[in-house]
Image (spheres, grey):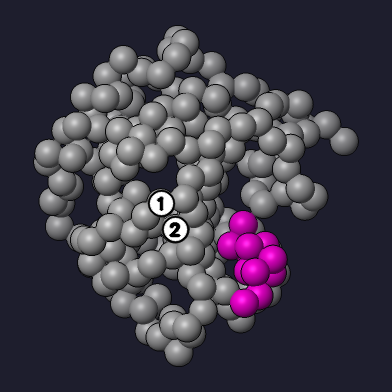
Amino acid sequence: MQANSSPIESSQRGVHHGLAQRVERALQHPWRRPVAEHSRLAFEHAQQWRAPLADRALIIDAGCGVGLSTRRLAEQNPEAVVIGIDRSEDRLARDHGRLPDNALLVRADLVDFWRLALAADWRPTQHYLLYPNPYPKPGLLKQRWQGHPVLPTILRLGGRLELRSNWHIYVEEFAQATQLVTGITPTVEPFVPASPALTPFEEKYHRSGQQLWRLQVELLRQNA
């Protein structure tokens, strides 16, 4: 069966010319917006849930959408705990079957959750960013994670970070931004997803015949 997802269209033909400036600004001016109360409560819930399992490796599934990727990562890594975070209550409420005992879904703003995790000295072994909104219009660079002030926080959490997208430019931008912040050069490569795919987006893009891209980087844990 074939899907019919349209490829990303953008007038941007390469890494955004303003990327380095956005990254430098993020380094010089950390994000200071107050943490939303619902995000703080969600993080406290995650802390309490994780406490008796603190000896297990931690996997963060950032922007988990309907939570299917969190379920599958938990099934693939039974020795670890997997926490999926998404800002949409509607997406998280969709039923994809029983959640494994080693997985948790929470509704929170990722920008808040990442900052709280860093302040609490969380040390994920794996950190996934699966198919984030690419915001393909050139004027929306600041909406992409590589152009957002929270980028240094994401990278300071450490662990093996993996980002996937069907837009090569997005992945190349994130790789360049990561190198600018950390001095570490990520691996960027085309890939074919396993079956079953981790997310509905991955399945849809693959069935539509689109090339998928993966970034992987081993990050050193830095002090908050």
Instruction: Pick the quarter of the image with the N terminus.
Output: top right
What residue span does the magenta drawing correspond to?
A: 69-79
- The three-letter code of the residue at mark 1 reads Leu
Position of residue 72 in the picture relative to residue 66 (left or right): right
Q: Please indicate, yes or no, whether residue 185 appears anywhere in the rendered image.
A: yes
Q: Residues within 10 Å of mark 2 (few under 14, many from 20)?
A: many
Earlier along the polypeptide chain: callout 1 or callout 2?
2
Tell me: residue 115, above or below residue 211.
below
Residue assigned mark 1 = 219
Position of residue 161 in the picture relative to residue 25 (left or right): right
For the point 78% across and 34% down, the residue is: 207
For the point 15% across and 51% down, the residue is: 33
96 vs 210, nearest the viewer: 210
> Is disc 1 placed on a helix, strand or loop?
strand
Q: Quadrant of residue 143?
A: top left
Instruction: Pick the quarter of the image with the C terminus.
Output: bottom left
Pinpoint residue 41: horizontal percent, then vertical percent: 30, 73
Residue 71 on the magenta span: yes
Q: Residues within 10 Å of mark 1 (few under 14, many from 20)?
A: many
Q: Which mark is residue 92?
A: none
| Residue, far right | 1
Tell me: residue 212, above or below residue 152.
above
13 vs 224, nearest the viewer: 224
For the point 76% across and 26% down, the residue is: 209
Q: Quadrant of residue 131?
A: top right
Tell me: residue 204, above or below residue 123.
above
- The three-letter code of the residue at mark 2 reads Gly
Tell me: residue 182, above or below residue 94.
above
For the point 41% across and 51% down, the residue is: 219
Q: Please indicate, yes or no, whether residue 88 appears anywhere in the rendered image.
A: no
Q: Tags 1 and 2 in contact by the CB under 8 Å rule?
A: yes
Residue assigned mark 2 = 159
